[in-house]
Amino acid sequence: MVKLKLDTPDYFDPGQGVKDLKGREITFLIIALVLGAVVGGLVGEIIGSFLPEGAVKTLFEKSVDIGFKPTTVELYTICFTIGLLVKINFVSILFIILVVIYFRWWFM
């Protein structure tokens, strides 16, 4: 009897379900989520710029700022600025959801 070995990724074992993700896949997911948010925000702003005034335009253009504004710390010899601000709109959330769905379909 000949046994065939199927080339399945090593994180998928039909008997045990999904194993832990590798570092490379987690890095890919994080980069894809950030790019999805950026591209989604850009697409939302572009679509919103062509729409007439109203609720739909507000839906596409309205964004929520998450984070904190830049703060400057001045020491005697060193001066540095710390800040992180993320602007999320409706389309960027849709793109993030699409990235998660694609990731689950492709890697899980």
Image (cartoon, rainbow, N blue to C red):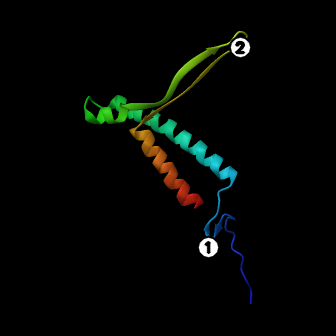
Q: Residue furthest top?
A: 76
Q: Is residue 47 above or below residue 105?
A: above
- How many labels, in total? 2
Q: Quadrant of the N terminus?
A: bottom right
Question: Toward which corner of the image does residue 78 lie, by quadrant?
Answer: top right
Element at label 2: loop
Pointer 1 local density, CA inside 10 Å: few below 14, some 14–19, many at least 20: few
Element at label 1: loop
Q: Quadrant of the C terminus?
A: bottom right
Question: Toward which corner of the image does residue 41 lie, by quadrant?
Answer: top left
Q: Residue furthest front?
A: 76
Q: Amino acid at mark 1?
A: Pro
Q: Residue at x 26, y 34 (%)?
A: 55
Q: Residue at x 48, y 45 (%)?
A: 96
Q: Which mark is residue 78?
A: 2
Q: Position of residue 45 (x, y in %)?
A: 41, 31
Q: Position of residue 85 (x, y in %)?
A: 51, 28
Q: Residue at x 27, y 30 (%)?
A: 52
Front one among 34 and 2: 34
Query: Image check: 71 left or right of 76?
Result: left
Q: Is residue 39 above or below residue 26?
A: above
Query: Image check: 3 left or right of 96?
Result: right
Dot 1 corresponds to which residue? Answer: 14
Q: Residue at x 51, y 36 (%)?
A: 38
